[in-house]
Structure formats: structure tokens, C-alpha cells
Image: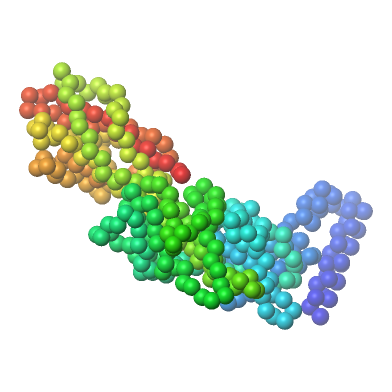
Amino acid sequence: MKSYALKNSSFALLAAIIALILCNCINPISISTFIEDERVQEIIGGRVKIYYPGSDENLIPGNKRIYGLNPNRYYMVDIQKPDSSFEFIGFVTKSGNRSNKLEDIGRVHGGEIINLINDETYLVPFADPIINDTVLAFTPVDPEWNNLVTNGVITFPSGTTSMNVTNILTETPGTEWETVKVDSANDTELVTITANQILLEGDNTITDYIFVQKNITSENILKFLVLRVVIQGISELEINLTPYALPTTITPNPDTPSSSIDILQIFDPVALKTRTFTIGNAATANLSNFRWIYNGIDLATLSPGAVTLNTANGVAASSIIIDFSHNSFTDAELNREGTYIMTVQATDPGGMLWSSNLEVIITNN
């Protein structure tokens, strides 16, 4: 009865619109826009249905599409069959379409799944983050490093080349695993796993690994998991200052040292967001009165917590820790993608200026 009433009301609406057009009461262009409106289309043509529990609770059914996808999640879609069971119909690609190939999966740009069928019921789960405290060994081994997963993320030190996923790929008879990686640019690639080892990306990268376990016979998806792997960049850099013949405030030409940090690392909740810079010859040259100038701004003027001055080799304030996620850097737009010059200055007992420049590179890999 509800379906019949809806159709009748839809026809009545269209008949009324046609009558208004014929009597020149309304503009056909404006009514065309009205008819094409997504909400009107849903009234006339219906919408899809979402099955709960099991689907992302934030999803919204629409006309031949589903809205509300989280841009930081990965999704798959099942359709309900007449016997109420579900059949896998694809992973969601970054364009919002579906593909049976895991290597086509991606973070959805437009926040919606498209090209669905109205009145059909869909189950739309997202990849489950690897559970907390899962142990993942890595190479080269660092016994002092915490190798536990936290909130679906694991962070490895600079120089890590591989990780062991034995504790993820549990063996079950009649099943097989498939794995892909998705980088910061949302590009996806199949992953080859040898002896449960995955070769990782380089320093200063953030990569999502998606693990899918299938039933070999039915090809049903049994597990749909995701792990974010953060590999730190070199977090400490030592620099030496150069003396100048006369005390001067002229900025010297950039020297060769550089330090990099990925912009996603800055805002990731568990990734290392700091870099440490230390003056290597502060003690031997008997330097003091240090100034750290980043992109023309004296770091001493920033809010507390943005930088921390430390003693190195017995010389106070000759080392600095910079927190690039601090509000002082965000508000001043100093942690966006780009290359920044940091100038370090000091004086010796005779009043001579010592100085050096280095590059701080914020990347978006």
C-alpha cells in the first residue's frame, strides 16, 4: 500500500507540473532543475537500503548511491540475495565504484558509493583496524622500540626495512590471504609477502596495508583488516656553526644539512611529530647566546610547548626540539608542505658571530 501511494503521488506531482508548464505558470528550466534534484529523484525513483548491523553506522541511503563514507576508511559491499544471505559484489574504489579486485580499493574521494540499484539492500562494512597490542617484529631489530599496534597504527624507527606479519595472517584450512598497500597519494599496489615478511617503504612515509582473507571455494570474504605503518624520518640532526670575521646579522647562504618530515606524520595521532637539532661544535667553540630562526621567526617567541631547549655536551640551549604539530606552527602556516630555512646563530667569548643555515622540508608523499 505504501508503494502504491508513493507512485500515485509521484504521478500526481508530475501531472501537476506538466499542467503548470502548459499554462506558462512556471519556467520549464526551473522545473527541470527541480526534477533533477537528488531529493526529488529519491521521491520519484526510490533509494537503496542499508543492512544493519555490520555496515558503517554513519552511512546514508540515497538514490542509486550511499552517502557518508569516511575518507579515511576502506569499504567493501555485499548485496542481499532473495534467501536473505549476502553476496560480495566488490571493494569500493576511490571513485566510488566497485571492483572485485583488491588492488582497485582506495579511500573514496566523493564520500559516496555510486551505481547501485534502488530498493536493493546492501551490507557496507569497512576494514577493521588491526587490534591493539598485536606484536609485529621488524628489521633491523631495535630491542628498545615498542613494536605494538595502537589504534590500528604501528610506528617504526628510521631505517626499518621490513615487518613480520605472522600475527596477522593466521592460517585457516581452505582460505587464502591477499594484501595491498595504499600510500599517502591514495595509490594502491599488490604486496608480495615472503616468509610472512613485508618489505616496507622508506623513511618518513605513511602507508596503509589492507589484508583480506577469502574462502578459496566460495570466495566469501572472511576477514577485512587494515594496518597503518608509519616509518619515521631521521629525527635528529647535528649541525656545526661557521665563524664570521666580524659580528653581523647577515644571513649566510644555505648549507647542505636538511631535515624532512611528512605532513601526514605531523597530524597523525601516534606518529613522531618532533625533530631535534643540535649544534655539534658548541662546546669546542665555547658558544653561547643561541638563536633559532625558522622561516624568519625567532622560535623563542612561540608559545610554550612549540620548542624545547636542551643542554647538549654540557652547553645549555645548544639543542632544540621542535614540535611541528603545535598550534604555533599551524596558526602561522609553518607546517604546510614546502621547504623552510632555519638559521642558527651564536656568539663566542670575543663577540664573533657563528651561524649556519639548514633546510627543513615538509613533504606530502
Residue sitting at the far front:
195
Taking depth in this image into account, of 162 and 145 the one nearest to the observer is: 162
From where the camera sits, is residue 228 visible? no
Q: Position of residue 207 (x, y in %)?
A: 46, 53
Task: Looking at this view, name the residue that lies furthest to the top.
Answer: 245
Give above or below for 253 relative to 132: above
- Pick the quarter of the image with the N terminus: bottom right
- Residue closest to the eye, 185 or 216: 216
Which color scheme does this rendered protein use?
rainbow
Residue 169 seen in this snapshot? yes
Q: Residue at x 42, y 52 (%)?
A: 200
**In-image side of 289 versus 180 (left or right):** left
Horizontal side of residue 215 vs 164, given as left or right: right
Residue occupying the far left of the picture = 349
Front residue of 191/279: it is 191
Expressed as whole percent of the image width and height from the top left, the position of residue 101 reads: 63, 59
Residue 143 placement (x, y as % from top left):
25, 60
Residue found 10% across the figure and 28% down from its top: 348
- Image quadrant assignment for residue 291: top left
* Residue occupying image coordinates x 14% and y 44%: 311
Out of 322 and 225, give the one closest to the viewer. 225
Give the side of residue 150 with respect to residue 21, left or right: left
Rendered residue at 55%/63% (across/down):
178
| Residue 184, image x, y percentages | 48, 49
Q: Is residue 222 above or below residue 305?
A: below
Compared to 246, does 76 lie above or below? below
Examine the rendered structure and indicate whether residue 333 appears above or below residue 155: above
Residue 237 appears in which quarter of the rendering?
A: top left
Query: Across the whole image, how many numbered discs are drawn on residues?
Result: 0
